[in-house]
Amino acid sequence: MQRSIVIALAVLVSLPLVMKSRGSRVVSAPAAFSVISSPTVQISISGDVRHPGVYSVGVNSVTSAVIKMAVPVRPVKHIIPDRCSSKVAEEGDLLKFTLQNDGTGIILCDLMPANDRILLGIALDINSVSESDFELLPGVGPVMAKRIVEYRQKNGSNIKVEDLLQVEGIGEKKFKMIAKYF
């Protein structure tokens, strides 16, 4: 009899704890449609558009179509066809849209500045980063940035990230700090 009283008390004491830990389950209705996630790239759009800024677009988006997302300030009659207007947008592209008075659109392509790419988590290209861009990285000052650029100039303009270990003053610790940006 004592045993059954102890068991009953144990159940009564533990039951609220078990029920509380389960939490409430919210059952949601099924979605009306599914969104299939596809790979995207981040690009920046500026110039004669109503909504300049950074956009995440599909990896196969053509730059002239992407400009339409940013809504040009006036109607566009046509975009001058060139290599930039028909190219597929790439991670870190900077698109500058200019709309002439006659409605002709011109798209100029460039790369986002290094500081924007760093903030957005977009990899830098070690072979095109300038001395001042290297200084934006943690642990890299003017002297180290100069050494890296000099190393790159001496050893060809096509170095790998691992080659930074050959630069005087870059050891394993500093390498790990800056390698993640490339």
Image: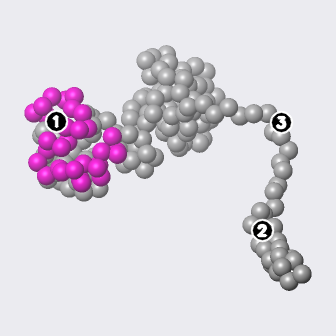
Residue 33, image x and y in percent?
A: 79, 33
Q: Is residue 174 visible?
A: yes
Segment colored magenta: 153-182
Q: Indicate yes or no whether the magenta region holds residue 52.
A: no
Q: Which mark is residue 174?
A: none
Residue at the extreme bottom = 2
The local secondary structure at tag 3 comes to: loop
Residue 82, image x and y in percent?
A: 45, 17
Q: Earlier in the sequence, mark 2 or mark 1?
A: 2
Residue at the spot x=60%, y=31% of the render?
38
The local secondary structure at tag 1 comes to: helix
Query: The disc labelled 1 sits on which kind of residue?
Result: Arg
Alpha carbon separation for disc pair 2 and 1:
63 Å
Residue 62, image x and y in percent?
A: 54, 23
Residue at the spot x=54%, y=23% of the render?
60
Residue at numbered disc 3: 32
> Is residue 74 placed above or below 29 in the rendered structure?
above
Residue at numbered disc 2: 18
Indicate the quadrant containing the N terminus: top left, top right, bottom left or bottom right: bottom right
